[in-house]
Amino acid sequence: MAQLIISLNKQIIKKLTLSEASYLIGRSNHCDIVLNERTVSAEHAHLVSVGDECFLEDLHSTNGVYVNHIARQKHLLVDKDSVRIGKYELLFQNSSPQ
């Protein structure tokens, strides 16, 4: 099963197993994954799982979403992709065959 390892300033702050079909990522308290830092938009990105595939979509955030240091609007995540949202780094890990 896929998971996200969330880091801030090179310190792991959370490991999250992606068991739901959809996650809203942002600064707002109503988000599923709250990244409480001013460089993160209130509703920054959306993560959707379909079968063994996970898609990440930027929700027209102010500072964008970067996957492996490249700005992306929508991206199919693969094992070991590094996602940057604001000052946070999210490492995507997927042990499922794709």
Image (tube, rainbow, N blue to C red):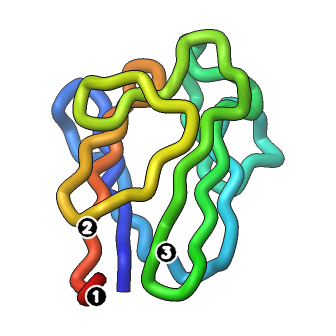
Residue occupying the point 20% across, 38% down: 11
Type of the residue with mark 1: Ser
| Location of residue 84 (image quadrant) | top left
Structural distance between the alpha carbons of marks 1 and 2:
9 Å
The residue at which mark 2 appears reads as: 93
Kindly indicate whether the residue at mark 2 contacts the one at mark 3 (C-beta within 8 angstroms): no
* x, y percent for residue 65: 48, 28
Circle 3 Cα neighbour tier, 10 Å, few/some/many (<14 / 14–19 / ≥20): some
Q: Secondary structure at mark 2?
A: strand
The residue at which mark 1 appears reads as: 96
Against 71, residue 97 (above or below) is below
| Location of residue 17 (image quadrant) | bottom left
Dot 3 or dot 1: first in sequence order is 3
Structural distance between the alpha carbons of marks 3 and 2:
10 Å
Residue occupying the point 28% across, 88% down: 96
The residue at which mark 3 appears reads as: 18
Circle 2 Cα neighbour tier, 10 Å, few/some/many (<14 / 14–19 / ≥20): some
